[in-house]
């Protein structure tokens, strides 16, 4: 409040911040205090940096954006844990989170042009674009520490503190849009993909080796939903669908069950648009197999099976002729039979897990087929009787 009294008083405060006693008092660096299990220390230091962001916002109000950023960098450069590679134990450090809270408070309400300048300033400061290029051009997992640093910086500094989805979408767009689609998918996986609970590093094989859980896919699904729902010209529906398509082969082709789960978590609108795109492009066999795995996920997670049937019914309306529609429905029936036979052959060939996951998967699929066709029969009979 004092900083807004007059320009003179504000300058006195700026001068005080620059002194050793001012910086020692204001730039708290207790980022590794893990003694309090209830995390009260965490919330206290985060609140401190939120307040500090507000102080800097008011003190530098009359300066041009470029000068504001230079001054703030000059002050904060003393805090090593705010730097991209500044902390030796980044997984146990709150430094980047506090830095993110500070920047979010500082830039809240700034227009897009100013925020563009902030992002460009941070990229120059950290050499972020070069580091991203190294990560996406390397073999997945060959630069694990760099991948982890990129993830922590992007999540803790740029993305996780915003309350409005439009703000989160803006910053995620800044990160992704300069890159070609294949690199966007790699970056999305690095920033939001599943990680090891032991060391926080990205787990690249998770989607291609076995069916995964909702928790492992939630970050990716939320990011995709954010971009799809973003009211911005920078992301069309086709852009997001292409990104999902590209993501499903990172680092290699995913199990279709994991792809189906991601689509379900990404929301009904995106799921339908993705499926309609395959229908329009004549990829009906792929679409039919996707229907099978959507039904399997519904069965495993105890979701209502009529969701899958209604989604299929909606997709049927995309086909322009009865012949195309009937061909698609035949493909769905065939796909159920093919996938069941594939699973059965895998089990009979002796390729069984110690905990019988393959057999359990087949068990779920047979039940999924039964429940799926039960819902189709309900729909058909109820329609014919009401007619």
Image: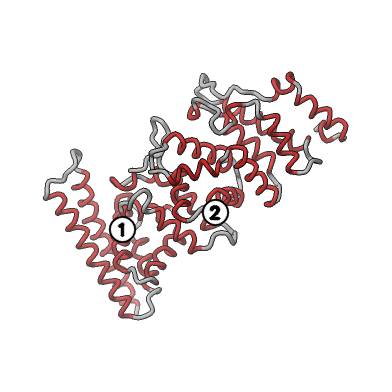
Q: Nearer the viewer, residue 265 or 281?
A: 281
Q: Nearer the viewer, residue 100 or 273?
A: 100
Q: Where is residue 145 drawn, in percent x and y?
A: 44, 34
User: Which of the image's four quarters has the C terminus?
Assistant: bottom left
- Labels 1 and 2: the sequence-earlier one: 2
- What residue is shown with label 2? 177
- What residue is shown with label 1? 295
Q: Is residue 362 visible?
A: yes
The residue shown at (58%, 37%) is 126
Q: Where is residue 227 drawn, in percent x and y?
A: 52, 55
Would you say 269 lies left or right of 335 here? right
Viewer-nearest of labels 1 and 2? Answer: 2
Would you say 297 lies left or right of 266 here? left
Would you say 110 lies left or right of 258 here? right
Local SS, label 1: helix
Would you say 254 lies left or right of 175 here? left
Q: Where is residue 371 drawn, in percent x and y?
A: 26, 59
The residue shown at (60%, 44%) is 162
Q: In which quarter of the view is residue 14 placed?
A: top right
Residue 101 vertical placement versus 92 (above, below): below
User: Which of the image's four quarters has the N terminus?
Assistant: top right
Q: In which quarter of the view is residue 352 placed?
A: top left
Q: Nearer the viewer, residue 170 or 293?
A: 170
Q: What is the count of numbered marks?
A: 2
Local SS, label 2: loop
**Res. 154 mark:** none
Q: In which quarter of the view is residue 334 placed?
A: bottom left
Q: Where is residue 22 drawn, in percent x and y?
A: 74, 22
The residue shown at (57%, 24%) is 31
Q: CA distance from mark 1 to mark 2?
A: 34 Å
Question: Badge 1 local density, few (<14 within 10 Å), some, or many (20+)?
Answer: many
Q: Is residue 385 visible?
A: no
């Amino acid at each position: 409040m004092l900083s807004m009294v007059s320009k003179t008083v504000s300058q006195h405060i700026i001068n005080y911040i620059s002194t050793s006693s001012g910086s020692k008092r204001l730039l708290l660096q207790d980022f590794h205090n893990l003694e309090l299990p209830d995390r009260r220390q965490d919330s206290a230091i985060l609140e401190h940096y939120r307040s500090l962001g507000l102080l800097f916002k008011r003190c530098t109000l009359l300066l041009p954006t470029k000068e504001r950023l230079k001054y703030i960098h000059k002050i904060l450069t003393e805090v090593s844990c705010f730097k991209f590679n500044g902390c030796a134990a980044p997984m146990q450090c709150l430094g980047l989170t506090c830095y993110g809270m500070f920047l979010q408070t500082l830039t809240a309400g700034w227009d897009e042009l100013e925020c563009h300048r902030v992002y460009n300033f941070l990229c120059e400061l950290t050499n972020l674009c070069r580091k991203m290029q190294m990560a996406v051009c390397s073999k997945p997992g060959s630069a694990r520490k760099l991948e982890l640093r990129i993830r922590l910086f992007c999540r803790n500094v740029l993305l996780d503190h915003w309350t409005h989805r439009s703000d989160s979408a803006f910053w995620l767009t800044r990160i992704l849009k300069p890159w070609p689609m294949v690199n966007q998918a790699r970056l999305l996986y690095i920033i939001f993909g599943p990680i090891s609970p032991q060391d926080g590093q990205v787990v690249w094989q998770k989607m291609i080796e076995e069916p995964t859980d909702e928790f492992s896919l939630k970050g990716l699904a939320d990011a995709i939903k954010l971009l799809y729902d973003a009211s911005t010209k920078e992301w069309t529906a086709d852009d997001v669908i292409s990104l999902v398509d590209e993501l499903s082969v990172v680092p290699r082709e995913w199990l279709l069950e994991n792809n189906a789960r991601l689509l379900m978590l990404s929301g009904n609108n995106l799921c339908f648009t993705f499926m309609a795109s395959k229908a329009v492009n004549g990829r009906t066999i792929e679409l039919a197999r996707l229907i099978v795995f959507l039904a399997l996920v519904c069965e495993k997670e105890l979701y209502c099976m009529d969701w899958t049937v209604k989604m299929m019914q909606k997709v049927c309306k995309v086909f322009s002729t009865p012949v195309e529609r009937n061909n698609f429905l035949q493909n769905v029936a065939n796909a159920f039979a093919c996938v069941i036979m594939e699973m059965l052959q895998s089990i009979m060939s002796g390729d069984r897990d110690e905990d019988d996951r393959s057999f359990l998967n087949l068990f779920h699929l047979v039940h999924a087929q039964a429940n799926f066709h039960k819902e189709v029969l309900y729909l058909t009979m109820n329609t014919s009787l009401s007619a």
